[in-house]
Image (spheres, rainbow, N blue to C red):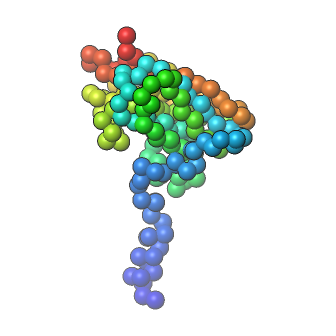
Amino acid sequence: MGAAVILAALTAAAAPMPSSPDLGKKEGQCRAGEHGPALLVSVAGLKDREGNLKLEVYPATDADFLADDNLLLAAGKVFRRVEVPVPGAGPVELCIRLPGPGTYAASLLHDRDGNRKFGWRVDGIGFSSNPKLGWSKPKAAKVAFAAGAGLTRLSIVMNYRSGLGVAPLR
């Protein structure tokens, strides 16, 4: 085997997995009757019932919170995702599996236009522990939550564009 073929094989093996909106979904899916650590998020303050909700769980460190999902998974770190259409009526709750008890950070996107990206003019955003938002992402310590061995319940309040910033709806 030539050096070019070996180099190509090594480069392909070391490359992170291709990006996909489905990364972390299989690991994050809650199943009926399944026991173990999970997060149940009640969503408060939705602007409307359009689009999708995307809940993601990260390690509660500044370096890893909101980091690229491919890099987190390639490094063997926690990343979970659940994405569902916003229900037309009633209370809104999302369940996401956790790898074990511990401290995590969560983000929740109300993707009103369905483009799978946060657009501050259109979409809503919320975080575990509901920190007051500024112009940059919150520090991991401000959004960290402790999860136990069973079901951990949290409420996340959505924030939308308000003047020059983002805040909960009034």
Please tell me which residue lies in front, 13 or 115. 115
- Total numbered labels: 0
Can you say which quadrant of the picture contains the C terminus? Answer: top left
Relative vertical location of residue 30 with respect to residue 13 in this rendering, above or below: above
For the question of whether residue 89 can be seen, the reply is yes
Residue 95 percent across, percent down from the top left? 57, 35
Is residue 105 found left or right of 167 in the rendered image? right
Residue 91 percent across, percent down from the top left? 51, 23
Q: Residue at x 54, y 38 (%)?
A: 57
Residue 115 percent across, percent down from the top left? 31, 41
Residue 38: quarter of image: top right
For the question of whether residue 134 can be seen, the reply is no
Please tell me which residue lies in front, 120 or 48. 48
Is residue 21 found left or right of 31 in the rendered image? left
Please tell me which residue lies in front, 123 or 139. 123
Residue 132 percent across, percent down from the top left? 44, 18
Q: Residue at x 57, y 44 (%)?
A: 28
Task: List the single residue furthest toward the bottom.
Answer: 1
Q: Residue at x 39, y 31 (%)?
A: 110
